[in-house]
Image (cartoon, rainbow, N blue to C red):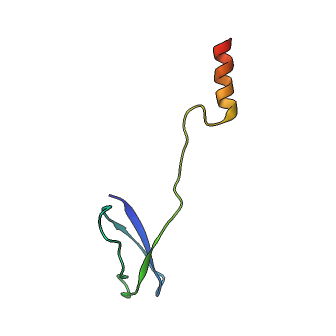
Amino acid sequence: MPLYQYQCTECGVRFERHQHYDEAPVTVCPECEGEVHRVIGPVGIVFKGAGFYANDSRKNKHKAEA
């Protein structure tokens, strides 16, 4: 179940909610009952393995030819 982060436009409080994909997004602040919007944050991506850089794939080709 994904974790979504929201921020209130009136009081500025941030909060998180676990919600299913098919659930409607939260629209009311739990503190002041003002309007909220979903905050989109950065996502960490890690590339593992060979072949992500030009020099990685060249090393493999040279080894195969030798």
Q: Position of residue 59 (x, y in %)?
A: 67, 24
- Give the residue drawn at x 43%, y 69%: 5
Would you place residue 46 above or below residue 14 in this image? above
Asked which quadrant contains residue 13, the reply is bottom left
* Left or right of 41, for residue 32: left
* Left or right of 27, for residue 44: right
- Give the residue drawn at x 32%, y 65%: 19
Count of numbered circles on the image:
0
- Give the residue drawn at x 36%, y 87%: 33
Would you place residue 60 above or below residue 29 in this image? above
Q: Position of residue 21 (x, y in %)?
A: 33, 61
Q: Position of residue 37 (x, y in %)?
A: 44, 76
Q: Residue furthest top?
A: 66
- Give the residue drawn at x 54%, y 37%: 48
Q: Position of residue 32 (x, y in %)?
A: 38, 88
Quadrant where the C terminus sits is: top right
Quadrant where the N terminus sits is: bottom left
